[in-house]
Amino acid sequence: MRVKVDLLREGCVLSEDVYSLTNKPIVRKNTVLESKHIHALKAFLIKEVDIKRETKSGKDILNQDINEEFIEEENLLIEDLYLDAVKKYKKMFFSWQAGAPVNMSLVRELVLPLVEKALDDPLKIMGIYKKCDSEQYFYFQSLAVSLLSAVIAKELKYSQGDINQVALAGFLSDCGMSKINSSIIFKKEMLTEQEFKEIKQHPIYSYKMLKELPSLTEATKLSILQHHEKLDGSGYPLGFKGEQLHPFGKIIAVANIYQAMISPRPYRPRLSPFYTLEVIEKDEFGKLDLTIIKVLKKLFRIYMNGRRVGLSDGTVGKIVFIDEKSVINPLVSLHNTSEVIKISKNGPLKIEEVF
């Protein structure tokens, strides 16, 4: 739970390390706060920290006399937090372009509250792509990948610590793009072969920016380097494959491809999530981890069931059933009729939009 330092009381328990301008935390995770800790946080100009819902004595923090201000923080919609975080990420990226190092304290302050919200309501993350602005796609993508990666990691039963590291890796995976000419990154047409060759170097740039940071695990740094690699060795930048790939990187690879396709770009509209999943199942078979794809399909099926959809002939319907063995072929009840049709791979109708 994210809380302003001014609202802290003795007995609150930190749920995450607190960093300032150094690479070592000034107050460590699981510290039971005393007045000296709170004074130290204020002295270092820390504005907010993550604390556990319960105090050391087991009392629910929301039952204390400051509950209204805590509740206001708790009830912020994840969509609002996401849009605010996109703006902050954009400022971070500009600072990296200007040569500033990655400030992990600021990164954690930005990412981890969103992760907490995402894990509480994972289906919100499946629909967060609708908030993406095509002109600002690049900034939306890093956060979307981070949050979807965290949700997948939770479904795979990762520890909270590992979930946080996966989320941080997803968020920072494209920080190396700051070392590439902006005319390439924000180009509104398809990239040339030479431009794409330069883009393929960004995982290496990202890794170099982060490799000396002690607050990131080696696994996290490796997954950032590998987030565009494939199981068959067809990925980039180094052509790693099979057992050489770290599990964190495999998660980010799936989340990155899915979010990139369903989000709008300056040179094309967003692609249908159903079409995207079909492409991933077909074109990425043998290249992406099937266990992770299975988790994505599970989340996809739960999110899509019962949603209104627009079909390729202009009609509107509602998804009434999705078979877990054939997620991209749902049963759709057509609007204002009693007709129910199955969307099949080779059929005349496709789902083009999800409302």
Image (tube, grey):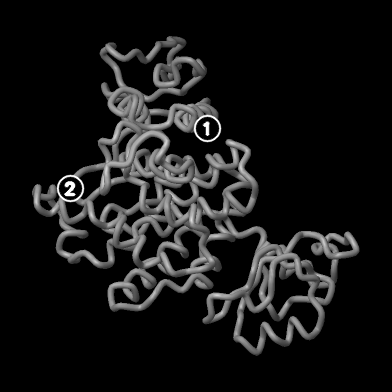
Q: Name the side, left or right, on which 155 lies relative to 193.
A: right
Q: What residue appears at the point 59 percent right and 36 percent down from the top-left corner?
A: 155
Q: Which residue is mark 2?
A: 267
Q: Nearer the viewer, residue 149 or 266?
A: 149
Mark 2: secondary structure = loop
Question: Residue 240 appears at what percent x and percent y?
Answer: 32, 41
- Is 117 drawn above or below residue 52 in the view shown? above
Judging depth in this view, the residue of 238 and 94 nearest the camera is 238
Circle 2 packing at 10 Å, graded few (<14), some (14-19), many (20+), is: few
User: Closer to the camera, 169 or 132?
Assistant: 169
> Residue 262 at what x, y percent from top left?
34, 40
Q: Which mark is residue 324?
A: none
Q: In the figure, residue 259 lies in which quadrant?
A: top left
Rendered location of residue 138, percent (x, y): 31, 56
Q: Nearer the viewer, residue 212 or 71?
A: 212
Tell me the residue that label 1 is attached to.
299
Q: What amino acid is found at the position of numbered circle 2 in the picture?
A: Tyr
Q: Residue furthest front?
A: 244
